[in-house]
Amino acid sequence: MKALILVGGFGTRLRPLTLSLPKPLVDFANKPMILHQIEALKAIGVEEVVLAINYQPEVMLGFLKGFEEKLGIKIVCSREYEPMGTAGPLALARDKLLDGSGNPFFVLNSDVISEYPLKQMVEFHKSHGGEASIMVTKVDEPSKYGVVVMDEASGEVQRFVEKPQIFVGNKINAGIYLLNPEVLDRIELRPTSIEKEVFPKIAQENKLFAMVLPGFWMDVGQPKDYITGLRLYLDSLRKNHPEKLIKGANVVGNVLVDESALIGEGCLIGPDVCIGQNCVIEAGVRLSRCTIMRGVRVKKHACISGSIVGWHSTVGQWARVENMTVLGEDVHLCDEVYSNGGVVLPHKEIKSSILKPEIVM
């Protein structure tokens, strides 16, 4: 089997982290976002992954070559020279996706984190005999999304309603598809949307089916959702692989720590914290609902909550970082500085407090 991952754009919503790396390579739970997907695809027998990409393809491929050998999966790029939407990239990668076997192929949106129930999706796709399967997820506020209206018993998709003002359903497209090769015949080589132009036509012919995603789902393309996604991911680890989370007197709730990280005495860590490779957390530090990326040093008695600290940054003694602060790569927050929602670009030294949410250039 093959799969295509829609890598696409510039990751502007996740800046300043994406100023250092393309978004799919930004760490999520101590590994690049896209690696969560590639590992899930490999686990169900996908042999080749095509990355549809228009931004820094050489960085992506250079980085993923190492994983290609480690995971035993082929990774190739399909380069877009202009943004092609969500369907155009499939037409562009047509020759890479068609192998003459007639097997369906996966398409995934690179921002999506879930438990990836891909094996169940293959079984569902075989069972209905249609042309395309999409994964849908239930949401609390469907009026913010495009809603998929479907037959609950068969899963057959009847129609799509964009941001409905009256209730028509609570299931939205989760950005994970399994498509027969003939779907490619429906897509022209131009910028086009699979959700708005391709799927509605397949649905009109009664050949589109939706499977409700079991477990959690999150689009982690912006900081607030990244932090929420981390909580859901760690909850899922607690249920399925509790041995990966650390325990201890100074740990509250779900905490994921790389084995190379050092944690000092008298810290209180958690809930919903991820600490990356070679981090140093000094004595008396308080961390909650945050990601501390590779190579970060958090000095004594600092307090970080609801924030993301980028690679190789330093948070000074008695500093306080909160309210969705995002520190880019190699940012140095001086001792006793307070950041209330600051978004700090890479390679900056911050000597005075950021009292309200703002971008620090």
Image (spheres, rainbow, N blue to C red):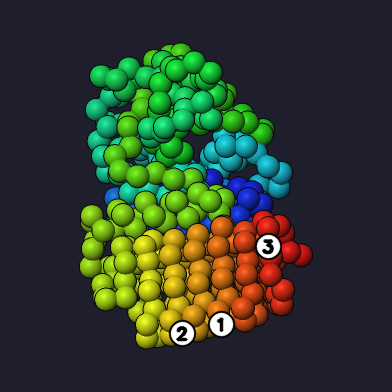
Residue that carries the numbered disc 2 in the rendered image: 282
Give coordinates of residue 249: x percent, y percent. 27, 76
Residue that carries the numbered disc 3 in the rendered image: 355
* 46 relative to 220 in the view: left or right: left
Q: Which secondary structure, mark 3?
A: loop
The mark found on residue 50 in the picture is: none
Q: Is residue 275 above or below residue 167?
A: below
* Residue type marked 1: Gln
At x 38%, y 74%, the residue is 268
* 289 relative to 223 in the view: left or right: left
26 vs 349, nearest the viewer: 349
Q: CA distance from mark 1 to mark 3?
A: 18 Å
Q: CA distance from mark 2 to mark 3?
A: 25 Å
Are the residues flagged by discs 1 and 2 in contact, CB closer than 8 Å?
yes
* 325 relative to 98 in the view: left or right: right
Q: Is residue 73 above or below residue 285?
A: above
The mark found on residue 317 in the picture is: 1
Residue 127: image quadrant is top left
Taking the image as drawn, is residue 1 in sight? no
